[in-house]
Image (cartoon, helix red, strand yellow):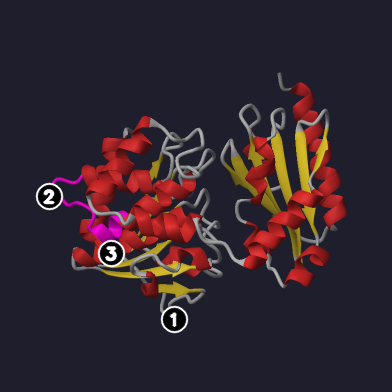
Amino acid sequence: MNSYDSFRQIWQAIQKGQNFFVAGHLNPDGDSLGCTLAMCSLLERLGKTAYAYASPAIGTDLLFLPGLEKIHVNELPPRPRFDTVILLECSDRKRGGDLESVLQNARTLVNIDHHLVSDAYGDVNHIDSTASSTAEIIFQLFEANEDNLLPTPEEATCLYTGLVTDTGRFLHTNTTAEALRVASALVALGADVNKINQVIYFTKSYTELKLLGRALEKMQLRFQNKYSEIVLTLADFEPLNAVPSQTQGIVSQPTMIPGVEVSALIKEEPDKVSVNLRSRNKIDVSSIAQHFGGGGHARAAGFKITGKSVQAVTDELAAVVEEIISHAH
Ligand SMILES: [Mn+2]
């Protein structure tokens, strides 16, 4: 099915439904939240009702997003009966959390995603792994609409946030001509680029900067300096009163070192170990993440493990990375 067909099916699903449930993935990032908000705003403009959901929490750097107060954080509806459920950014039907009660009662399930390995679990699916972000796809969906509906300035701000965060401020290899074209169109439609840049990129707390310092201090290069490993334990977080979500951006730092192919940030959390992976250019880290039950993109991926020590996870990951690095040319 080409994208024209799936966009047409999505518009048909939007026209047919009245009550919508819209959600992105767990631990929502800028793309997930931006798309959820833009989609809800669009649905409301069309006279529909939309229940926006995110779980378990929203990062402080995303609280500026227009319409954020409409999101039900960690709060599922008491009577989960919706005509249509729109899942964004969810490579499988569990990525949004425990939504089975909502999904099973929905008449139509729409799945819109750009992840490399994504199940076509919806009644209507639009999966495009060439898209930089789901925000890029949502903008294309607008363009595929026959009534000349365009994003409002607020919706444009939400979608631009998805684009700028998923492309790492237009620095990652997914910064395609199409990504830039969509970004340009969103700016023309009134996306508040200055505010987005100020809040997301030019604001860091004292704690976050101290944590960055601690992380860089602990960075180790292994396997002919092709693998960078940073392990942050509870003993690193506690003295700073820091939480694992305050490590954003840290994992990308080591990939600036020439020769480093894979960077891993391994975080000990009270109930699990979570790992972020980045690749400089050759190695597909999503396949490494999948090995451990996680997922993501070729250049950015991650996974979480419960019931294992941080040392065990560190060792198992290193063994997998060593194997892959030794076979990469
Ligand atoms: Mn995304």
Position of residue 63 in the picture relative to residue 323 (left or right): left
Q: Position of residue 307 (x, y in %)?
A: 81, 61
Q: Earlier in the sequence, mark 1 or mark 3?
A: 3
Q: Say if the magenta span includes residue 37.
A: no
Does the beta carbon at disc 1 come under 8 Å from ligand 1? no
Q: Which mark is drawn over residue 78?
A: 1
Please state the extent of the stretch shown in magenta in the rendering: 144-156
Q: In this figure, which residue is indicated by the disc labeled 2?
A: 147
Position of residue 136 in the picture relative to residue 153 (left or right): right
Q: In this figure, which residue is indicated by the disc labeled 3?
A: 41
Q: Say if the magenta span includes residue 154.
A: yes
Position of residue 94 in the picture relative to residue 105 (left or right): right
Gap in angstroms between the C-alphas marked 1 and 2:
35 Å
Q: Earlier in the sequence, mark 3 or mark 2?
A: 3
Gap in angstroms between the C-alphas marked 3 and 2:
17 Å
Task: Name the residue type under label 3.
Answer: Ser
Comparing 286 with 236, the one in front is 236
Q: Secondary structure beneath disc 1?
A: loop
Q: Which mark is drawn over residue 168?
A: none
